[in-house]
Image (cartoon, rainbow, N blue to C red):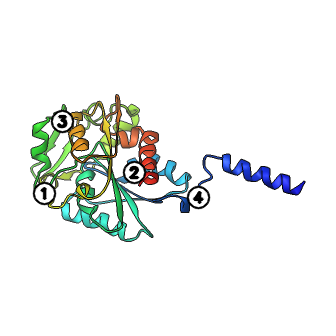
Amino acid sequence: MKKQLSLLLFTLWLMNPGFAQPSDRKINNIVLVHGAFLDGSGWEGVYQILTQKGYKVSVTQHSLKNFEDDVASVERIIDLQDGPCLLVGHSYGGVVISAAGNHPKVAGLVYIAAHAPDAGEKRADLVKTHPPAYQSLVKGSDGFDYIRPEKFPEDFAADLPLDRARFMANAQIPTADLVFQAVIQNPAWKTKPSWYMVAGADRIINPDLERFYAKRAQSRKVVEIKGGSHAIYASRPNEVAELIETAATGL
């Protein structure tokens, strides 16, 4: 009887979709990298989903004042990982992970509505090839940019609840215009596998530019979220987490 009960419990354990332990995965460490104008708190939904499944998730907080400092801040978090990791970048964070991704602990890159420049390319020049829809960027006289709060919900976060979008608008971190001029020389997506999520209704980065990035990087999987705003890292945490898991288990 005890033997039958043990067998039943073992069978039920196997049938549980969450039975896989971190040691069974190819990658268990996930590093989430935020983009311009906001901090890492927008990743909370993705963080909660992945940590509940046993992943070790770190969220970077970089200053948005200097590109080299931002890359160094992310590399500092990578150094702390206890094994190989996935780098996940949103928006400007894609430029950061394209540079920081050369770290030997980085096994792959996941771009979420993010820039993925090639060697010598400036993000500011790339957006001219596929102009975005928004016109709410304000370039401050002190060299720091921000998005007009009254336009932020429409341009940045149209698929978030309005009260949350307004909070994000008024919790912006002005971003140094210089970071948008950053140039990298050895983009990690050329030597490491990547995955890409296109925000189908993105007004900050033209979805066609996102599709171009994904195709050029030969991303292993490209997921397009219809109606997804630029804030899909926050508004669509389930879909984002699913793509990250695909990358973590598919390397």
Residue linked to disc 3 = 136
Find residue 247 and report its horizontal and vertical position in percent.
Answer: 41, 50
Find residue 25 and report its horizontal and vertical position in percent.
Answer: 51, 58
Secondary element at image label 3: loop
Disc tally is 4
Left or right: where 127 falls relative to 157: left
| Disc 1 from disc 3: Cα separation | 24 Å
Find residue 69 and report its horizontal and vertical position in percent.
Answer: 22, 65
Left or right: where 215 falls relative to 3: left
The kind of residue on which mark 2 rests is Ser
Q: Are marks 2 and 1 in contact (CB under 8 Å)?
A: no
Quadrant the C terminus occupies? bottom left
| Disc 4 from disc 1: Cα separation | 40 Å
> Can you name the residue that lies furthest to the top here?
227
Tell me the mark number nearer the camera, choosing from 1 and 3.
1
Sequence-wise, the earlier of marks 2 and 4 is: 4
Q: Quadrant of residue 156?
A: top left
Residue linked to disc 1 = 183
**Res 41 label:** 2
The kind of residue on which mark 1 rests is Val
| Disc 2 from disc 1: Cα separation | 27 Å
Tell me the mark number nearer the camera, choosing from 4 and 1.
4
The kind of residue on which mark 4 rests is Gln
User: Residue at 29% of width from left, 42% of height from top?
Assistant: 113
Sequence-wise, the earlier of marks 4 and 1 is: 4
User: Residue at 15% of width from left, 51% of height from top?
Assistant: 180
Q: Quadrant of residue 167?
A: top left
Is residue 187 depicted above or below 200 in this figure?
below
Residue linked to disc 4 = 21
User: Residue at 74% of width from left, 53% of height from top?
Assistant: 10
Using the rendered image of the protein, determine whether residue 83 is visible from the camera's viewpoint: yes
